[in-house]
Image: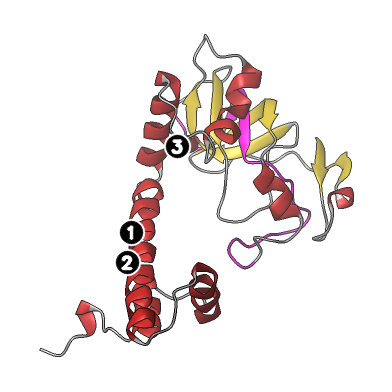
Amino acid sequence: MKAAYYNKFGELDNIEKGELDTPEPGEGEVLVRIKAAGVNPVDAFATQGMLKDAIPSEFPAIPGWDVAGVVEKRGHSARRFNEGDEVYAYARRPVIQHGTFAEYISIPESYLSKRPQKVSMEEAGGIHSEYTPRGWMKTEKELLIFEQHLYLRQPGYGTSYITGKYQVEEAMAEYARKQEAEGVPFQMQDFFDRLNQIGNIPISMGKWELSGMKPSFAQEK
């Protein structure tokens, strides 16, 4: 199949066009012939290696997470869609490798939704990059349906945002109180510099280190 891909991290001119093997759908997956793919700023971040510490990549890597197309083939036990069904998806996988800037993508059928008939392929292929995360306060019914599908397919996706936001704000408040008690003015940049230096640990542990306050689970009984 024809695809755009890169073999190493770097600037966008590292992206090549060429032929790669057409993927075969695995168990619970379908092969989608891509009709439209959204271009999202995160695609550039992935290509430049800015996400490599959070999401692993395997080369050659095809960028792109937003897609609309037609089901071409079903893998074993994939029964939600028939061949010829028009679908769209947010196709982010645990490893960046098989993206949407290609003629085909094999993807778990649970990621897919049927394309609404009043939404074109081009609109369906770009709905995720238009509405996630930018514009998330819009109230269009199609956006609400998309979000519900996304969160039901990936149950931790939405709640983790809200929980994480609350925990970071709580850590910031405790750090500010500690700084002010010591007569040191609170500075937002200083807080995030300290938080980033702590590294990828649970935020409750980071809050402990920043504020000196033990989390409830660490309290002696």
At x 63% / y 62%, what residue is drawn? 56
Please say if 39 is above or below 143: below
At x 36% / y 87%, what residue is drawn? 182
Real-space CA distance between mark 1 and mark 3, rounded to the nearest whole angstrom: 29 Å
Q: Is residue 77 visible?
A: no
Mark 1 residue element: helix
Question: For residue 166, which numbered disc appears in the image?
Answer: 1
Q: What's the amino acid at mark 2?
A: Glu
Mark 2 residue element: helix
Please say if 70 is above or below 188: above
Real-space CA distance between mark 3 and mark 2, rounded to the nearest whole angstrom: 35 Å
- 1 or 3: tag closer to the N-terminus: 3
Please say if 94 is above or below 32: below
Is 59 contained in the magenta span? yes
Q: Quadrant of the C terminus?
A: bottom left
Q: Nearer the viewer, residue 55 or 134?
A: 134
Marks 1 and 3: which is nearer the front?
A: 1
